[in-house]
Amino acid sequence: MITFSRTDTSTLGRWWWTVDRWLLIAIGVLIAVGTVLTLAASPAVAVRIGLPSFHFVERQIAFLVPAVLIMIAVSLLDPVSIRRLAVITFAGALLGVVLTFFMGAEVKGAHRWLYIAGLSLQPSEFVKPAFAVVAAWLFAEWRKGTGFPGWAISTGLCAFVVLLLLLQPDVGMSIVVVAVWLAQFFIAGLPIVLALGLGAMGLAGIFGAYLIFPHVAARIDGFLDPANKENYQIERAMDAFAAGGLWGRGPGEGSVKSVLPDAHTDFIFAVAGEEFGLLVCLAIVGIFAFIVLRCYSRLMTENNLFVLLAAAGLTTQFGLQALINLGVNLHLLPTKGMTLPFISYGGSSLLALALSMGMLLALTRWRPENGVLR
């Protein structure tokens, strides 16, 4: 185990004694669980589509190494450097999203991926955490009372991001981006009249998406109608949970991964339910809850508005993404192609989550102005 003296003034020494080690351990446990579940769920999917058995496992591990390095490296930064990194990442990711319309491959009717040096990357995954930090900075500058129109600039950027995401189309990610932005705006001091207006616009936007995008209408109709043919994946997922029971059928003994196209991504939680049982599923949910609540508790004594808004936005984003994936698996929400953080297979998702959690670890580090080290 790595240990440092409290008198160690090196970069790593200061990092070790100021970073939230409980949060770091929880993230490490999630990564380990994700590796095990990818090993359990992906070989059957790979064989079914004509790939080598461990194709997805090898790719996930290949992305995992740089992801961990990114998370640790970013967590060493101070809040000012985090802000600068977010601005650069946001600009680069937005450019990548625009390029997907001209150079990106179409997958299931959507233009979300760029192929670079043989690797597929989804730029919109990096827009989410970067925009949360950029929006926090703009809101914080606005609240200083200097007349800087931070809320207006943030609103314009949010509208632009959502427009690009809807053109891909990616309605689910658009909802997450808007929800996190609204949460930050509320914390920063959203006027009640504007809050009601934005809420009404949000409801109108969801109804508009239902009317405009056929795949959104199909998913909502399938969710509301149990007999709808669109419910095939949900029905298999529910069968998996029922078959797993309390203790599960055992590692490698599940059958749902052989019939679900997205068993290693969107429905990996169903694989966990069938092979490892209810208790392991509850443990996974508990880890997500611990991370979210731990981050919120660390912010209770935060005196820097930018840090408060940025960390709250990143935490809300992380928790909301997990909640949506779990809700879909349990048939509590309409199906949506959203991964379970650090659990589902996905290179872009893993790298973006590493960036997000690296920034969150950096922002929640103890600083003298925030009082006693916890």
Image (tube, rainbow, N blue to C red):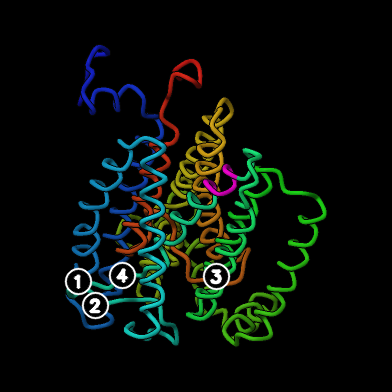
Q: Amino acid at mark 4?
A: Leu
Residue bearing the label numbered 4: 121
Write the start and end of the magenta stretch as one range. 136-141
Whether the magenta-drawn stretch holds residue 116 is answered as no
**Helix, strand or loop under label 1:** loop
CA gap, disc 3 and disc 2: 41 Å
Residue bearing the label numbered 3: 160
Disc ID at residue 53: 1
Q: Quadrant of the C terminus?
A: top left
Packing grade of label 2 (10 A; few <14, some 14-19, many >=20) is some
Quadrant of the image occupied by residue 40: bottom left
Q: Which of 260 and 3 lies nearest the eye of the viewer? A: 3
Q: Amino acid at mark 3?
A: Phe
The reply to whether discs 1 and 4 touch (Cβ–Cβ < 8 Å) is: no
Rendered view: 159 above or below 34: below
**Helix, strand or loop under label 4:** strand
| Left or right of residue 62, residue 296 in this image | right
Residue in view at x 53 percent, y 64 percent: 329
